[in-house]
Amino acid sequence: MAHQRRVILYCGAADRPPPELVCRWAAAQGLGIEAHPDPDETATLVLRGRGALVLIDERSRHPDGIELVRRIKGDPSTAIVPVTILTDRHNSAIIVEWFGAGADEVLSPMIDPAEQRARLDALIVRTERDVGVHPSTRLPGTNEIEREMRRRLDAEVEFAVCYADLDHFKEFNDRYSYYDGDRVIYILSRVLHDVVRGMLGPDGFVGHIGGDDFIFVTPLPEFPRVCTEILSVFDALIPLQYSEQDRRAGYFFGKDRRGQLHRVPLMTLSIGVVTNEHRRFTHPAQVSELATEMKSYAKTLPGSVFVVDRRRGDMDYRSGPGGLDARSS
């Protein structure tokens, strides 16, 4: 489906092709143009994930054009797809109506050709940026995480990829509420962002995979102190998200999948770390797979810890927030 996202869906009269300027711009962007005069068909294709951009030709005065914009922008699953209106009438009332329906851009012959191209460029960049950001935390999503890994692999620099995941988060959600759970995820996102960016500036990267899963990337020498600081800040803040009774006890009683009561400790944070110090990676997927493995191993250990993959015949180590390493074979 990836190639389908690089297509412009053009909705207009069959006898009114897109302007030459738009065709040349699309070709320069590597975008094909598909004509679909029927607004219903266009809306269906957008819903199926086809179309990096929708062009609606107002010049044909199609009465369903406004409704098509509303349908696309009214559905959360398609609202991110940019919609541009082509009009030959530079009329303020008409332009206001299109923007009121949800259009992202309106182009008319009154706008300088260079400015039209610049507006289309900005529209695509803005959309790709918005798609790449997780809506709840405003952190880069999976596409940007992969792009960051690939960038560092291509640069042939030594780096560490750290996969952070909450422990006992589901039980917390069950005892409190999804609202409280969302707050915890947001707090974790701020801890990761503020520590990584605060300590490393532009050399650090933080992304949100989804749910309570996060990835952060650091230069190789920096990950021990960054991970130690993250765990320290997290362990100081997370007890405050519990009731005073649960916080003082250090646990609460929750039911497992069989309905049996058991003690549930306060949430901790597990971080699996992978580096290219002793390994050669050729694709971000290899890094992600190993980071997931290390994160799963970290979750078997008590408390907030980070675990580093050092498999090359030597040992791995784990560290808690105190920064004291416990080595084991």
Image: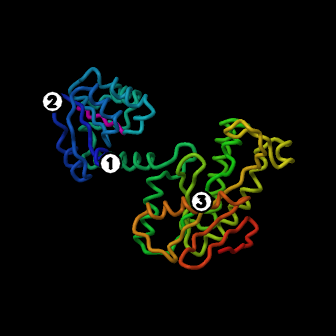
In the picture, the quarter occupied by the C terminus is bottom right
Sort mark 2 into few (<14), some (14-19) or many (20+) by Cα contacts within 10 Å.
Answer: few
The residue carrying mark 2 is 14
Label 1 sits on a secondary structure element that is helix
Label whose residue precedes the other's in the sequence (2 or 3): 2
Nearer the observer: mark 2 or 3; the answer is: 3
Residue at the outermost top position: 63
In which image quadrant can residue 9 be found?
top left
Please tell me which residue is depicted at 26% across the width and 41% down the height of the picture: 8
Please tell me which residue is depicted at 48% across the width and 57% down the height of the picture: 145
In the picture, the quarter occupied by the N terminus is top left
Three-letter amino acid code of the residue under disc 1? Ala
The residue carrying mark 3 is 295
Residue 3 coordinates in the image, percent (x, y)? 28, 48
Three-letter amino acid code of the residue under disc 2? Ala
Magenta run includes residue 86: yes
Badge count? 3
Distance CA(mark 2)–CA(mark 3): 55 Å
Q: Bounds of the magenta span?
A: 82-88
Label 3 sits on a secondary structure element that is helix
In which image quadrant can residue 219 be found?
bottom right
Compared to residue 329, the image places residue 24 above or below, namely above
Three-letter amino acid code of the residue under disc 3? Lys
Nearer the observer: mark 1 or 2; the answer is: 1
Please tell me which residue is depicted at 86% across the width and 42% down the height of the picture: 245
Label whose residue precedes the other's in the sequence (1 or 3): 1
Residue at the outermost bottom position: 314
Residue 204 coordinates in the image, percent (x, y)? 56, 65
